[in-house]
Structures are given as C-alpha cells and as structure tokens.
Amino acid sequence: MTTTATREIPYRQAINEALVQEMERDATVIYMGEDVAGGAGREEQGFIDSWGGSFRTTKGLITRFGSRRVMDTPLSEAGFIGTAIGAASTGLRPVADLMFVDFVGVCLDQILNNAAKMRYMYGGQVKVPFTLVTRIGAGTGSAAQHSQSFYSMFSHIPGIKGVVPSDPYSAKGLLISAIRDDDPVVFFEHKLLYPETGPVPEEPYAIPLGKARVVRPGSSITLVGVSRMTRLCLEAAETLAADGVDAEVVDLMSISPIDYDLVLESVRKTHRVVVVDEDTPRCSIATDICAAVAEEAFDYLDGPPIKVTAPHTPVPKSKPLESSYIPDTPRIVAAVNRLLSSL
C-alpha cells in the first residue's frame, strides 16, 4: 500500500470516512438503521442529518448519497436487519446498523439462520455481502442492557466473520474490508474509542480480515488485546518496561477467524501469555485463545496461560462498580507480575 497522506483523526471520523469512500466507490453499498439519517420525518420538520446516528458515525451520509442509499428504519431490528440480509443476497452490499450489540437477541434468527447459512445451503450460488456494524463495551454508565460486548457469541457461529478494531487506523481499514467481503461480517465499534485519535491515511485501504498484528514487539511475555483492551495492554507494557519486563502486545483485530498462527508464534518466542478481554469469561475469546495456546504451544510455556476479563456478572450501573468491572491497566500488570513471580 502506498500512502499519499496521513493525519491524526478520531476513531469516529475514520469509520465515517470508510463509509463515505466505499459508498463513492460502489453504488451498491447502502446504509440502514435507526436514526442514522436524522430520524423519521426529518424533511417535513426542516432538518436533515441532524446528528448522524446515535454515535455520529453516519453524519453527512444522507446529504451526500440521498435517502435511497441512506435509510432511517423503524424501531425493528428484526425487520431492517432481515431486509438488509435479503438485499445482500440479491445484488446490493448493505451495511445495517445495530445500535447496541445488546439488542442482538431480537434479530439473532436473521443473523444465525439466514445470513450465516445462506451461502452454504445454496451450495455457494448466493453471496451475502452483508455488514453489521454495532457497538460494544462498558464505561459509559449505560447499565446492563447497553454495555455488553458479546463478540464471543458471533465467533461461535460458522459463516459469520467478526472484527474488533482498536484504533482509528484499524477501524477504517477493517470496515472497508468488511464492506467489500462477500460474506457476512460484524464490525464491533467500542464506544469509548470514538474520541481516540491516531494516524490514518486519507486514501482508501483494506486490512485483511482474520489477521492479528503485533503492535509492540517484546520478548518477556505476550499480551493479547481485544478491541479497546489492546490500548490497555500497551499501557501495561509501558509500566512493565520500567521494571525490566519486555512485553509483546498482539492486537487480535479479528474474532472470527482468529489468527491463532500469529498468537502462537508470539507465545513460542516469549513463553508466557496473558489475554485481556472485556467480555465475560465463560466460553469467551480469552478462554478460547488460552485453550489454543495450551493445546498447540504447551511445550514452549514457562507458566499457565492467564486471562484478564470482566467478571461473570451483568454490567453494573453504579460508576464505581462499573470501573471495577472493566479490566484495567493495573489488573493486567498484576496478572503479569503474578505469572512471572510463580516461575
């Protein structure tokens, strides 16, 4: 990839830029969801594109591409996500906006039994280039029904791909790849990352789905981060470096497929691993990676794989309890020190 210009922009803007560039490139790309274009009846009330969705990632799309390609939908996730999946199977390349991943229960049948299985059940004769964008993560005081992560649920479904960008660069590149892919892809945006800034090329670029990356090389221990947890792993690595611990940080980027090869390569070098995952621990991405390491790299380990996750509870509304619920940098550092001291 040749870059012509790189500037520092927020995660939110990187997502918006990916949508604009893909909609300009391909007239079959459409966007639909609740309030993504300003709300029902916006034209009659004299306002268009008043906010650009609940998280302002779609601002400017309606005025640029019109109401035939950017559509406010009724408050029926089952209805408009089913519509998007049907549109994907008949020639369009829709992006559907599930406001919070917590709402997946009301449209899971469409995702689980239609999007994920249609291409397989038709023997490859039908493509389903459907992208579901949704939000994950606690930390906004939004309580138990608007703060969950749930990406592990999607990873469990054959036929669904899933990506978890951790910074503006990965957000733009992964969303472009998701939209261009001919299979269903879920794009998980972490709510606390929207204001975070980072270098992003102006031109379109695609990051391959199913690949992790090393964002900090090291030799003492591997820290694997998922979404926002990668940033915390980087912070923990800086803290550990002051004590002579050289941590390597792997940004998972994809929860389906998972790049086991890169994780295992890192662990075989460092001989230790801590996986940091904001989701609840049972049947989680962290649990899966720890199991893979134990199965495939056991002879290289100098200690057990360790996971740092949220507890197996609903997300608390109380701000102090919510802060304790979310994995943080001190917990990661403590897990590393506990592992190193046990050797």
Image (spheres, rainbow, N blue to C red):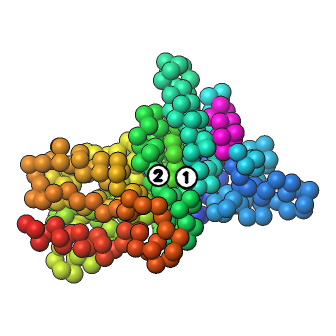
Residue 132, percent from left and from top? 57, 45
- Please give the residue where the numbered disc 1 appears in the rendered image: 101
- The kind of secondary structure element at disc 2 is loop
Magenta stretch?
A: 77-87
- Please give the residue where the numbered disc 2 appears in the rendered image: 150
- The kind of secondary structure element at disc 1 is helix
Queried whether the magenta region covers residue 311, the answer comes back as: no
Callout 1, which amino acid? Answer: Val
Q: Residue furthest front?
A: 313
Above or below 9: residue 244:
below
Residue 254, percent from left and from top? 40, 49
Above or below 299: residue 51:
below
Answer whether labels 2 and 1 touch (C-beta < 8 Å): yes
The residue drawn where x is 85% and y is 62% is 47
Q: Residue furthest bottom?
A: 242
Specify the principal SS of the magenta part: helix
Q: Quadrant of residue 15?
A: bottom right
Q: Is residue 203 visible?
A: no
> What whole-number distance in Å separates the C-alpha atoms at marks 2 and 1?
7 Å
Q: Residues within 10 Å of mark 1 (few under 14, many from 20)?
A: many
For residue 195, side relative to residue 258 (left or right) = right
Residue 204, percent from left and from top? 54, 52
Callout 2, which amino acid? Answer: Phe
Q: Is residue 74 visible?
A: yes
Residue 191, percent from left and from top? 54, 64
Q: Quadrant of residue 296?
A: top left
For residue 250, side relative to residue 58 (left or right) = left
Q: Count all numbered tags in the image, as a single digit.
A: 2
The residue drawn where x is 18% and y is 73% is 337
